Amino acid sequence: MNEKIVELVKKQLSEIFEDYPHTPDIHELAEELKSDLIASAEDKLSEGKSPENAVEESFEEFGDITDLIDEVMQDNNDDEQTDDEDGHRIDINQSGITVDGGDKLKIDKTGVFINKGKSFKADGDGVSIGDGRVFRADENGVKLGNMTIDGNGINFDQNKNKVRDTFSKFDEQFDHHVDTEVYVETLNLVNEESFAIEDIERLDINYSYAVLRVLPTDGDKIILREYMSRNNPDYFARTKVQDETVKIAQGRFPKFLHLRVRTQVLIPHKFIGDLRVNNIAGNLHINGISGLGTVKATINSGNGYFNNFSVENLSVRDQSGKVKLDNVKAEDALELSAHSGSIKINNVLGREFEVNAHSGSVRGVGLSGSGHIVSHSGAVVLSVNELTGNLEVESHSGAVKITMLPKNYKFDLQAKSGIVKAPQDAIFDHDTLDFKDGQVGNDPIYTVKGKASSGTVKLY
């Protein structure tokens, strides 16, 4: 780092900030500006400009810094605590919102609490009203007064030869080739690193704010490419190789300066280890990857797109956004969870499905496999190509519609508040308005269960 440039930037920023109060946010803004302006000036120095001219041009290109300071000062004023007309103390800050110190109301990253959670509580454990006496919804089901809605479990009775044939046929239509050069980013490439895959068993990718793409490549190196709207090394990823793991973590992200980040991670076709991806805010795209062991993807606020993707085990959890799979195979377990968003799966094969949409629909075309698919609030609409085991489909609040291409299976259909329809050629054991069970074909092995707590169940 050029000492002359550092000195000039610090001097000019000191003159700009000298009339402003020294609050924590103002100090952080000054530090972000210093880092960004030094990086910009050093780029200009490498182009042959003098330190003085490089710093001057960097400040000119940035624009009016006082406008940005005024915005931060205004945000500070808005965050200060206020009292309402009835004397309640209302605190609003970066941690959340409280009324009377949280006794009346608290809203923060842990959840929403009214009357210390006694009247209403919504957190990671579920939602409850009246300490759970009136209403409670959690991972075990829904309790409304004296009525409880929960699952009956999953019964797997798989035919190994049948499963093997189904997975083999799926492989014939799977295209492993993806041209990574098609993905040309609109931002400038500011950082590129590579890592040899020899002795590497896992790749960990952690980003907070970025559009993240994971793509295949030839060769024997994992490649990281970062595209940004600002060329500042402070923002580049922090990387290391440790315990047979390549670790990639997003660098510092400015609190006040606007920064756009698009990242590509290219994985060699020959890499057969595990992959773990976390992206807090931004979309995640995984395309053309095959041969990996276990892939775990977690998205906090954004969508997840998985295309032309083949692994042994796949787990996707999206807190706020939709999940979409196209032409995806999981040799063993396939777990999908969307807390607030829909799940769409097209041409997907999973030996054992566990699909859960808490607030949104589940729609699938060309499914093959077995397992459990449920929507807590939304419809479940599926088209099934082939069964490799029992399939259980459930909607707590919405319709269930299943179109079956196989013509040899047992069925068990229930609607607590609605009607049930079954195929015309079915052989019934029981046939009532809201419950039907029986079989289609002469020698069925697997069972299709459809259940709706509030809605219709239709099997075609």
Image (cartoon, helix red, strand yellow):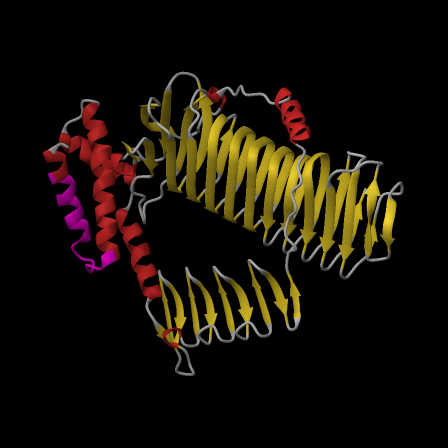
Q: Position of residue 226 (x, y in %)?
A: 36, 31
Residue 326, located in which quarter of the rendered image? top right
The residue at the far top in this view is: 219
- Where does residue 389 sit, x and y in percent of width and height? 68, 38
Residue in front for this viewpoint, 189 or 297: 297
Percent across and percent down for residue 46 are 20, 24
- The quadrant in which residue 190 appears is top left
Dominant SS of magenta comes to: helix
The tally of labels here is 0
Placement of the C terminus among the 4 image quadrants: top right
Which image quadrant: the N terminus? top left
Identify which residue, 179 or 1, lies in the foreground: 179
Tell me if residue 224 can be seen.
yes
Q: Is residue 219 above or below residue 364?
A: above
Q: Nearer the viewer, residue 277 or 100?
A: 277
Task: State yes or no: residue 14 in magenta.
Answer: yes
Q: Which residues are magenta?
A: 7-24
Q: Is residue 255 magenta?
A: no
**Residue at the image point whose x is 32% and y is 49% from the top:** 256
Residue 29: x percent and y percent? 25, 50
Regarding residue 57, the answer to whether it shows in the image is: no
Q: Residue at x 82, y 43 (%)?
A: 439
Displayed quadrant of residue 101: bottom left
Above-or-below relation of 29 to 75: above
Q: Is residue 184 left or right of residue 356?
A: left
Residue at point 47%, 44% (across, down): 299
Q: Is residue 68 left or right of residue 433?
A: left
From the viewer's perspective, tell me whether residue 192 is left or right of residue 457.
Answer: left
